[in-house]
Amino acid sequence: MHYDHIIVGAGSMGVAAGYFLAKKGQNVLLLDAFNPPHDHASHHGETRLIRYAYGEGLYYVPMALRAKELWEQLQRQTDETIFHQTGIVNIGYKDHPFMNNVIASAKQFDLPLEVLSADEIQEKWAGIHIPKKLIGCFEPTSGVLRVENCIRSYRTLAEKEGATIRTNSKVVAVRSVGDIVEVELATGERFTANTAIISVGAWAKQLLHSLALDLPLNPIRKTFAWYEAEEALYDQQNFPGFAFDFDGEAYYGFPSIDGAGLKIGRHDGGDSINPDEARVPFGDIVEDKSDLDAFLQTYMPKVGPMKFGKTCMYSMTPDEDFIIDRHPNHSNITIAAGFSGHGFKFASVVGEILSDLAMNEKPQFDLTPFSINRFK
Ligand SMILES: Cc1cc2nc3c(=O)[nH]c(=O)nc-3n(C[C@H](O)[C@H](O)[C@H](O)COP(=O)(O)OP(=O)(O)OC[C@H]3O[C@@H](n4cnc5c(N)ncnc54)[C@H](O)[C@@H]3O)c2cc1C
C-alpha cells in the first residue's frame, strides 16, 4: 500500500509528527515495534521535566517556547493531564556553564527566573539541604509533562485526523527506491510512501545501517526511582522539579505527583547497551540504588526510603545535541534521533518540525546545531 508519509517509530517524536501531518490532510502510516506508549523504549516513567531557560544552550530556547505553546494546545484537545506547573529549580555553581546559560536564556528571552542563594533555597523549600557554595535558578513557569498521557493524546488525535497506526510492527529495512521510500517489516510485509520519517529512538543506529548511514549514536541504560516522601514537604503544590549539576554529576527529579512519591534519576553516566537485548533490571547493579540514596541523604535528607525503581534508555550523541535532519543522500527521508536524555520536552515542536520537513516546508527554527554533517 502507498502513503504520502510513513513514520517509522511512533514514540515521543514520531507520534507527534504523525498528528501534525494527518492534521495537514496527509495520508500517514505510523509503524511501531510495540504499542505506544509502552515501557520498552525511552518514554515511560510517568514524568518528564520541561524547562525553557536552557542550560544546554540558548539555541534551544525558541524551540522550548514553541513546544510549550503546542503542549498547551494539546491540553485543550484532550481530557488527559499534560502538564503540571510545579516550577523547576536548577542547582549548581555560580559560574558553571550550565547555570550561566540558564541565566543568559532568561535575560535574552525575558523569562521569569529567580536566582537564589543556598540559604534562600532552604528557606523556600525545607526539603532541600545544600552547601552555601551552590546557587539555584528557579523558573516558576516550567514544570512536569505527563509523558505517557502526551503520547497517548497525540496518538488518539492522529488517528482522529485519519492517520493509520500499526503496532507490534517492527521495521527491519528502509530503502530509497527512485523517488519513493520502501519500508519492510520483520514479517516481510512492505509499504511505500513519498517520504519517510525515522524516529526509532535508541534503535536509530542499527536501522539507519539499511540506508548506509552510520551515526555516532550510543544507547545507554538509565535508572530512576520513587521514594516515600512527606507530602507537606514534597508534593507538587509544595516542591518544584529539580536539576542538580555540579562536580561532574547530574541528578534530576520530580515532586510527589498525585501521591506517587518523590521521583529521582541520575542524568550522567550509564552503561552502553544493545536495545534489542533485555535490560539488566533495576537494582541488579548496586549503584542503581546506592547513588540515588547517597544523593538524597546529602541534599534531601527528609525524603524516606525507596519505593521502587525502573530502567529506561537514553540515546546519546557525542555533543548531546539532537539529530533532526534529512538523510544526506535521500532528501525525502528525515531523521529524528539522539535526543540524549533531554528530548521529551521538545516532542511537540519536533513533531511540528518533522512534519514541515516531510512536506518540504521551511521549519521556523535554525536546525544547524542538529545537522548530520556536524559529525564529519
Ligand atoms: C529515565 C529518563 C528520563 C528522562 N527525562 C527527561 C526529562 O526530564 N525531560 C526531557 O525533556 N527528556 C527526558 N528524557 C528524554 C526523553 O524521554 C527522550 O529524549 C525521548 O523520549 C526520545 O524520544 P524518541 O521518539 O527518540 O524515542 P522513543 O520515545 O523511545 O520512541 C521510539 C519508538 O520507536 C519504536 N521503534 C524502535 N525501533 C523500531 C523499529 N525497528 N520499527 C518500528 N518501531 C520501532 C519504539 O518502539 C518506540 O516507540 C528522559 C529519558 C529517560 C530514559
Image (cartoon, rainbow, N blue to C red):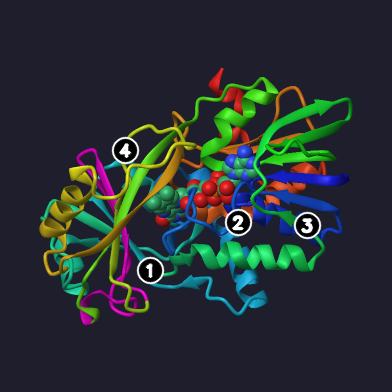
Point out the tag, 1 or 4, that comes first from the N-terminus.
1
**Residue lying at 38% horizontally and 68% vertically, measured from the top left:** 87
The magenta stretch is 232-257
Residue 194: x %, y % from top left: 86, 39
Q: Amino acid at mark 1?
A: Gly
The residue identified by callout 2 is 35
Query: Mark 3 packing: few (<14 Cα in 10 Å), some, or many (20+)?
Result: some
Point out the tag, 3 or 4, that comes first from the N-terminus.
3
Q: Amino acid at mark 2?
A: Asn
What numbered label is drawn on residue 87?
Answer: 1
What numbered label is drawn on residue 270?
Answer: 4
* CA separation in Å, label 3 and label 4: 36 Å
* CA separation in Å, label 2 and label 3: 13 Å
Q: Does the image show residue 343? A: no
105 sits left or right of 222 in the view? right
Q: Is mark 2 within 8 Å of ligand 1?
A: no
Residue 122: x %, y % from top left: 16, 68
